[in-house]
Amino acid sequence: PRSAMDHQPKFFENLSGTGKAIGVLTSGGDAQGMNAAVRAVVRMGIYVKAKVYFVYEGYQGMVDGGDNIVEVSWESVSSILQVGGTVIGSARCKSFRTREGRLQAAYNLVQRGITNLCVIGGDGSLTGANLFREEWSGLLEELAQKGKIDAEAVKKYAYLNIVGMVGSIDNDFCGTDMTIGTDSALHRIIEVVDAIMTTAQSHQRTFVLEVMGRHCGYLALVSALACGADWVFIPEYPPEEGWEDSICFKLSENRARKKRLNIIIVAEGAIDCHNKPITSEKVKDLVVQRLGFDTRVTILGHVQRGGTPSAFDRILASRMGVEAVLALLEATPATPACVVSLSGNQAVRLPLMECVQMTQEVQKAMDEGRFLEAVRLRGRSFENNLNTYKLLSNKKPDAELPKTNFNVAVLNVGAPAAGMNAAVRAAVRVGITEGHKMFAVIDGFEGFARGKIKEISWGDVGGWTGQGGSILGTKRTLPAKYLEKIADQMRTNNINALMVIGGFEAYLGLLELSAAREKYDEFCVPMVMVPATVSNNVPGSDFSIGADTALNTITDTCDRIKQSASGTKRRVFIIETMGGYCGYLANMGALAAGADAAYIFEEQFDIRELQANVEHLTEKMKTSIQRGLVLRNENCNENYTTDFIYQLYSEEGKGVFDCRKNVLGHMQQGGAPSPFDRNFGTKISAKAMQWISKKLKETYRKGKVFANTDDSVCLLGMRRRNLVFQPVAELKTETDFVHRIPKEQWWLKLRPLMKILAKYKTSYDVSDSGQLEHVAMLPKGAEPAAI
């Protein structure tokens, strides 16, 4: 909480980089999204009038100097946003580990006046940077003694500022929820698993997949969650003694239940409780010898590091890059080296060495066999993932399940969104584990009224995580005109709680049902909503299930369109996205695809704005980047339609550029759900189900469930850093019902980012950033929002 600070917003226009020089390097293993970070640092640096230098080939280039350290321009980073890996190269460097090497590096930097470094890499690279910073003044004095630099330089360049960004596909760095590249690596793994599932299903095979992660099981764990794997082996959580028997028992039981395929995921660093490695070959041999199942091993290897960065990684890296430059501008000799990272949905700065120390603590705990401690130190998101996985993967025998005699119904409402099925699966399985009978409603409220409702079992939802659309079927119909019939169905099937997975209609539906409680006792039961819509326009949540998948679709399409323009030169594309009145997809799509402008309803624009954008593009065509990309939300303005904007640009751009338009349409609602949506859907839905169980216990009186307070109809959303249950009645004041959007939307704060990276002068409120925080161990019982 900032007290006095709140009244005076801090604007970055007041921070100047004049006279400062920033060096940017990538080091350690490569990761998708590093280029997006490099691009953001370069453009933000130039924007604040600092000089920016590439350091090629990591620390090796810093030691070698010469052509390895060059000043760069705005255009130098054009077209790298969609490229995986790092275009400035990364190398393992032995000489930087010696004092001689660091002395040479310091000399090379001082020659160019560089005293600000932005390092993008893993924990090793960042530790090296910190040591360099601590030695800096000593190195300069030594250079002065040797007569390589003068006393003036020692005074002028007395301090080295360092800001790190973590680029690592393993997500093995403490203090950050997501490292740059993790989400893209998950994309690669999930693509492979989805492909393998179809062949495994055809032959009734067992597949053992080995994923990267020598010391960290994050990739293995989350991909197991995202594809519903039967078993996962990770270094932080070794299986108990006798695991060989348990895994064989589980696999044979699965076969008996007519499950045609088994997927086992092994992290490359997996170990048993005696710290002995568990390899994918070992697991395969076990299954073949004991069960005789047809078993195959697939080792994913470097595929995981490759390919284009996902939308999430591009946005994450762009946000971090801009934040890193702000941190360098504000750094003083007294501020410790920091890393910029993401906590929940918020950019934060953390002392670099605190993060490194905690990361090393995890390894130490694992080496000493303190595995529970290791999981706890990994942080909230890891622990959360592990608990959810344990909850959903193993069905207890019926005899061991509690019996609550409660019936809970699950339904989908609104338009289809990728990840809905993952949410249904999680709800059904958690419900069964908690002892309830689970019912599935087909075709939303309309199907409910018609009695399309049936009991659904643990096995019925197997394999649902990777399916797009809505298997249960979904309709936009609201319940108001069917209240009588729905109440009948609730009574007939003795439904004691409702879980609704859907978009804005689901929210309106819950408001209608809670208003109908006065008339119908049947609606006096706990009800919860989980937001699922590509538009991300539900009040009470920063994210909704399906929006990430849609964003990736938009980004992929924009990449292809940009590529088509690179051949023809001087062409501008106008692309229309979905979202109703909510500009989330257009705005974030523009950030992820490196667009020049995004027209949205939330930020009114007029003909002068359009004119300015055309002039901006005309200027751009004079540079070496001869193409433009403009996104337009479908409802941003009823008169300035996509056609109108296309015709205006065509007329005004005559002789300078030509125009094409594209309406993306319903492809934004389809496709296999992204890892983020599978994981988010699974986790948020499991949590909603646990809330239902708690409410059922609280409201059970004299043999029946009776709940009629506001807090028994809630929406579960992610807000900044936490997952919160909010009564829908309280969200009414936050909603613009005419345009079906929340009155305040967090992502509007990121709008200036897109403009800065596209070279527009803009105002940017950075009051949120700046305070150095400490790496917090989460108090027991606090609810993290980490995805």
Image (cartoon, rainbow, N blue to C red):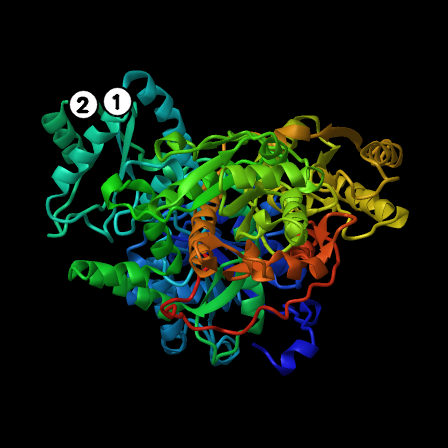
Horizontal side, residue 28 vs residue 631: left or right: left
Q: Going 37% across and 66% down the picture, which residue do you hit?
A: 355
Residue type pointed to by label 2 = Phe
x%, y% of residue 126? 38, 62
Horizontal side, residue 380 vs residue 323: left or right: left
Q: Which mark is residue 293?
A: 2
- 727 or 25: which is nearer to us? 727
Residues at marks 1 and 2 touching, judged by CB atoms closer than 8 Å: yes
Q: Measured along the vertical axis of the image, is residue 163 above or below residue 200?
A: below
x%, y% of residue 667? 62, 29
Task: Say whether disc 1 or disc 2 marks the residue closer to the N-terminus.
Answer: 1
Direction top: furthest residue:
202
x%, y% of residue 150? 47, 77
Residue 571, quarter of the rendered image: top right
Horizontal side, residue 733 vs residue 169: left or right: right
Q: Going 31% across and 63% down the picture, which residue do you hit?
A: 377
Q: Going 50% across and 57% down the picture, which residue do you hit?
A: 24
Horizontal side, residue 318 vs residue 367: left or right: right
Q: Secondary structure at mark 1?
A: loop
Q: Gap in Å between the C-alphas at discs 1 and 2?
A: 7 Å
Residue type pointed to by label 1 = Arg
Q: Secondary structure at mark 2?
A: loop
Direction bottom: furthest residue:
4
x%, y% of residue 435? 35, 46
Question: Label 2: few (<14), some or many (≥20) within 10 Å?
Answer: some
- Name the image quarter holding the N terminus: bottom right
Q: Measured along the vertical axis of the image, is residue 157 above or below residue 77?
A: below
Q: Which mark is residue 205?
A: 1
Residue 38 visible in the current orientation = no
- 395 or 16: which is nearer to us? 395
Question: Label 1: few (<14), some or many (≥20) within 10 Å?
Answer: some
